[in-house]
Amino acid sequence: MPIVKVCFTPALYPLYAARESITVVVDILRATSAICTAFEHGIEAVIPVSEIEDTFFYKGDENCLLAAERGGSIVEGFAYGNSPKDYMKPEIRGKTLVITTTNGTQAIEAAADSDLILIGSFLNISALSEALSQLQMDTMILCAGWKNRFNLEDTLFAGALTRRLLDNGFSYALDSDAAMASVAIYQAAGSNFYDFLEESSHRKRLAALNLEEDVRFCLTPDYTRCLPYMDGPIMRNARNVAELESIVASRLAQPEINALKK
Ligand code: MLT
């Protein structure tokens, strides 16, 4: 039986990382939600980078859109930030998005040694949970948090996804208090996530920037069926679970994905 684990911040990732396992990176407000929105609206690929300077290499490439966010705001000089609304425009179709954000892209980098990194958000929660349920591999949900601190919205999502996986053949690990706590938070939240997050730090931070509509949007389930995954330094959208299965199989240099199933 595969296990599901939750890691509350990228700083804790080395304590939870395991071989032959999938990592789902989550930054509900707003990086992974913006990325899922971009794929839904036709972006071809995403290159997540840690530092603002890392985007400069792509300057002048007309196929690339450069995006940078720090502290919730668009970095001066950039046309794109981290609002899902930025990625609902027809002009993004077929382009490559090069993006750096305060926490989300750092979390992706922290998990770089995973066998497979998937991108999770409420916007793609059903497609993602169905894919993971089919893959039946050990899975870690890595919350981006805020500057390596715990946050409520990523943990809420981790609980929602963990609950679905537990209902589909997964079990807790032995040292699974973080996953259990996430499920408890998800169950305590009830059906109104927006109200539940009222006092949370990043909801307040985004409210101060007049970005409450972004918060509401990022809490919307199933806006898209996209399945973003990391292919080396580039993120692509998997067409289906079979594509993910063959990627995992080739990464682990095993001919049959079934050999990985628990
Ligand atoms: C991040 O990566 O820290 C966030 O997505 C911040 C934000 O833009 O709201």
Image: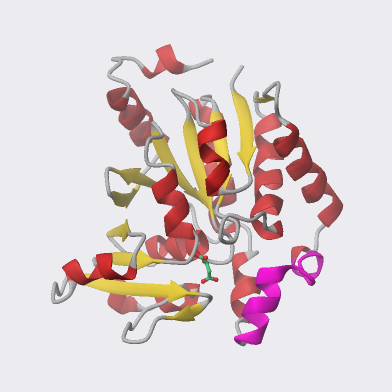
Which quarter of the rendering shows the C terminus? top right
How many numbered discs, if any?
A: 0
Q: Residue at x 62, y 78 (%)?
A: 206
83 magenta-colored? no
The type of colouring in the image is secondary structure
Tell me where residue 257 appears, x and y as whole percent. Answer: 38, 19
Q: Residue at x 70, y 70 (%)?
A: 201
Compare residues 6 and 160 and report the one nearer the observer: 6
**Residue 72 seen:** yes
- Residue sitting farthest toward the top: 259
Q: Main secondary structure of the magenta part?
A: helix
Whether 37 is drawn above or below 247: the answer is: below
Residue stretch in magenta: 194-209
Side of 155 relative to 109 (left or right): right
Q: Residue at x 50, y 61 (%)?
A: 103
Whether 1 is drawn above or below 242: the answer is: above
Q: Looking at the rendering, which quadrant does residue 154 occupy? A: bottom right
203 magenta-colored? yes
Q: Residue at x 49, y 17 (%)?
A: 261
Tell me where residue 152 appears, x and y as whole percent. Answer: 71, 58
**Residue 88 seen:** no
Compare residues 53 and 165 and report the one nearer the observer: 53
Whether 156 is drawn above or below 205: the answer is: above
Which quarter of the rendering shows the N terminus? top right
Side of 66 relative to 134 (left or right): left
Tell me where residue 7 appears, x and y as whole percent. Answer: 61, 41
